[in-house]
Image: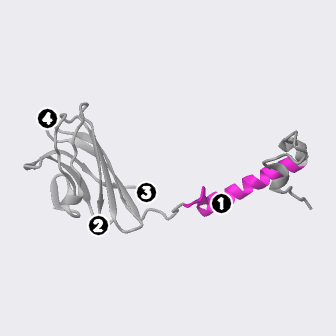
């Protein structure tokens, strides 16, 4: 039977003799140190596997569905980039779009549409939930939308980037969502 030392035998604020503070190696013999280290590693592994580490609970629930898209420019002044879309465990859908090639100061609405790039259908969710893409001085833009709608993994969808809030008919970038996994 192996007996592990009490933590108070290893770490204390004031040395018992008022002088020398013993190091761990002074209190625990080498074989016991190895057992203590292995025990600590085992406890850490168990806690990590349970999803509890660092005082917080980690959600290990698999994402019900996820998609990616490569967004291609559809006009000479269009945007290209990528998007990720996932259904969260709450049932909401989170979409993130990152673009390059835009003009600084631009203002581009984007949406997830039913259908594909050749024939985009209805917008998924509330249009007001999609923050606009506004390219920085390098022409890069990124935005994340959380939608109170759950996408159907069996349907087709596309990310559509529009020319501007007053120019929704012009599409400057589009990418079909491809189911991951």
As drawn, the label of residue 148 is 2
Q: From the image, tell me which residue sits under label 3.
A: 181
Alpha carbons under labels 4 and 2: distance apart: 34 Å
Sooner in the amino-acid sequence: mark 3 or mark 2: 2
In this rendering, position of residue 24 left or right of residue 128: right
Residue 46 among those drawn in magenta: yes
Task: Locate residue 50: give its quadrant.
Answer: bottom right
Image coordinates of residue 23 in percent, x first then y, are: 84, 41
Rounded to the nearest whole Å, what is the CA distance between mark 4 and mark 1? 53 Å
Q: Does the stretch in magenta take in 158?
A: no
Q: Which residue is mark 1?
A: 47
> What span is in magenta?
32-57
Tell me if label 3 and label 2 are in contact, CB under 8 Å.
no
Residue 114 seen in the figure: no
Label at residue 76: 4
Characterize the magenta stretch by its predominant secondary structure: helix
Whichever of labels 4 and 3 marks the residue nearer the N terminus, that label is 4
For marks 4 and 3, give the CA distance: 33 Å
Please tell me whether mark 3 or mark 2 is closer to you in this view. Answer: 2
Choose top left, top right, bottom left or bottom right for residue 148: bottom left
Determine the secondary structure under disc 3.
loop
Q: Is residue 142 above or below residue 130?
A: above
- Image quarter where the C terminus lies is bottom left
The disc, 2 or 1, on the residue closer to the chain's N-terminal end is 1
Callout 3 touching callout 1 (CB < 8 Å)? no
Q: Residues within 10 Å of mark 3 (few under 14, many from 20)?
A: few
């Amino acid at each position: 039977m192996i007996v592990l030392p009490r933590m108070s035998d290893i770490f204390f604020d004031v040395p018992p003799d008022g002088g020398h503070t013993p190091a761990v190696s002074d209190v625990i013999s080498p074989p016991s140190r190895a057992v203590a280290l292995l025990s600590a590693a085992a406890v850490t592994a168990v806690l990590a596997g349970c999803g509890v580490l660092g005082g917080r609970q980690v959600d290990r629930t698999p994402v019900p569905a996820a998609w990616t898209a490569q967004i291609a420019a559809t006009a000479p002044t269009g945007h290209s980039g990528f998007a990720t879309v996932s259904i969260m465990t709450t049932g909401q859908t989170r979409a993130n779009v990152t673009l390059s090639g835009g003009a600084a100061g631009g203002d581009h609405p984007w949406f997830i549409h039913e259908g594909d790039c050749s024939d985009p259908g209805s917008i998924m969710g509330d249009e007001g939930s999609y923050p606009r893409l506004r390219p920085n001085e390098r022409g890069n833009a990124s935005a994340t939308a959380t939608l109170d709608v759950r996408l159907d993994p069996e349907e087709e969808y596309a990310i559509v980037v529009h020319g501007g809030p007053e120019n929704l008919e012009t599409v400057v970038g589009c990418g079909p969502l491809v189911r991951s996994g």
